[in-house]
Image (spheres, rainbow, N blue to C red):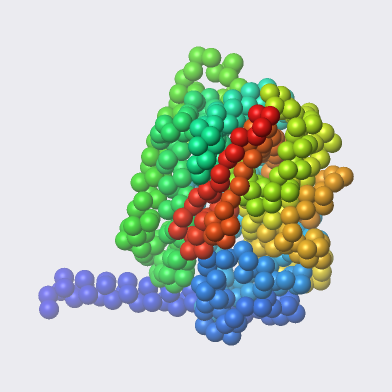
Amino acid sequence: LSKPSLGLNACVGLCVAAGCLHTTWKLIYAQLRRRRMKKIMEDVPWARYDGRDGFAGFLGDLKKNKRRLNDWLHEVSLDLPVSKMFGLKIDFRQTWLLIRDPAGVKHILKDSFATYTKVDSSSSPLVPILRRFVGDGIFLLRHGVGAPDGGSAWQRQRKLASLIFTKANFQSNMGEVFEEKAQRLCALLAEPAREGRLVDMQKLFFSFTMDSIMQIFFGEAANTLGGEGCVYSDAFDAAHRSMMEYVRPSTAALILLSYLPWPLGGFDGLAAKLHGALSPDYRSFNRAVRTLDRESMRLVKKCLADPALSERKDLLALFAQAADKDFTPKYLKDMVLQSVLAGRDTTACALSWMFFVLASNPDVQKKLQAEIDKKLPSGTTPSFKSLAASEMPYLNGVLYEVLRLYPPVPLNSKVAHEDDVLPSGDRVAKGAVCFYLPYAMGRDPKTYPEPEVVRPERWIPFTPPAPHEFPVFQAGPRICLGMEMAIFEAKLAAAMLLQRYSFSISPAEREKIHYVNTLTMAISNSKNQDSHNLWLKPQPRAQA
């Protein structure tokens, strides 16, 4: 062999050896971390899942229950205020704590807020993909000791958002937009109601909330309710759906690939990129995200160039007016994009489940219509005041019962960045992912007797539940800023629809209803989660 060939072979050999050493170190480090975590949490009760001692840990049981994730988590943790789960034996990042004890939820979301923060890109394959989807806005920024900047970027965005999400800023514009879109929704149902046709109400609710959000957040007219295309809406939905279709079945493979040496390893390494490039779902996700980025930047630049910017009342304009001079268009785009994920999908899910509950429980629907007829007779436009819990207790009870049974975000997580001890005395190891479970907590028979029964009277008279006991809107410093807006939008749409129509569902269709495993819990009318309709029959009311 020539000297250049020998030199090249030696170089390749060194690279391979270095790569092997790097991977070996990663595996050794992971085992040491996992052993330490297991030792620290040895007294924490085990969740009741199959495969505890197997190589895959909880992943085997998770795969078997992938279409009923929330019910599975509820079952394996029932009667256990805190429980632990371990995944792949080679991976310390799959060390989970399931927390359904309200004191534990309060601890991680409020009392020890600085210790528990968002999972980062090195700990979960979802995070870099989610960041690709919605950018670097407030929902992905970390706070506390786990943040590289100590949380200053999160605090900056949170402060700005809290100044904007106020009743003073939104009440006039928001009420008018919601009323206009709800009137349009009601009008669309007139013909199918007369003809006795079924209507996919979930599709309409997602269109209603998107049309509302486009107007309130961007000052942009949209008519997806009328069947018109909306590039932003279509791209957003395609990106969300494709992202989850790719991530869930790919998690184990991406974890194993992350142990490869640099530059192949890591959740954002070359191997992960190649894995994504070979996936039709990820390619669909990328196409949708490119469209979403392009359309988002168009809206931001249009807003910034508007001579009447100071007079606009939409969310993007308010952010632009309040933002520092060094805020870039991308910064503004990311802030508003994450608000769309939080403000549009969650309310559409809540409305979909609300009308499923009403159609499935005619007695509840009749009681609610009686309250509406008395307090908001046909032709009366609802307002913030008229929709308050004190004015319409049954409507408020129905909504809270729906949120209890079908929370739009059924589970959420924070990661411990220091060793800690929960109020229960259970120890938490640094790096443990702590899940709190609104879906499971809302179905706990000790808190809610006969939890499967829809009983709006549970919330009458109404005392707002402590956020850590009912963490549908999170709790502590990261509590949802748009909570009041979402509650008002859902109540207004429900009241206006029920002024004019009653809704029913066939027994066969009712049996099909399930949920989808996306970030927000929409309805699926298939146990395999491959169909996403809510087929209801609207019927005109006599006085409407």
Q: How many marks?
A: 0
Residue furthest out toward the left: 2
Rendering quarter of residue 277: bottom left
* Identity of the residue drawn at 71% across and 24% down: 380
* Identity of the residue drawn at 68% across and 29% down: 543
Q: Is residue 515 left or right of residue 45?
A: left
Residue furthest out toward the right: 461
Q: Is residue 496 visible?
A: no
Query: Percent position (x, y) of residue 271?
Result: 36, 64
85 up-or-down from 227: above or below: below
Q: Is residue 502 left or right of residue 55?
A: right
Q: Toward the viewer: 77 or 128?
A: 77
* Identity of the residue drawn at 35% across and 77% down: 17
Rendering quarter of residue 468: bottom right
Image quarter where the C terminus lies is top right
Q: Toward the viewer: 162 or 92?
A: 162
* Identity of the residue drawn at 21% across and 71% down: 8
Image quarter where the N terminus lies is bottom left
506 up-or-down from 382: above or below: below
Q: Is residue 85 left or right of residue 294?
A: right
Query: Percent position (x, y) of residue 426?
Result: 77, 72
Residue furthest out toward the top: 307
Query: Percent position (x, y) of residue 483?
Result: 70, 40
Q: Is residue 317 left or right of residue 473?
A: left
Q: Toward the viewer: 124 or 508?
A: 508
Query: Percent position (x, y) of residue 445?
Result: 78, 65
Q: Is residue 11 visible?
A: yes
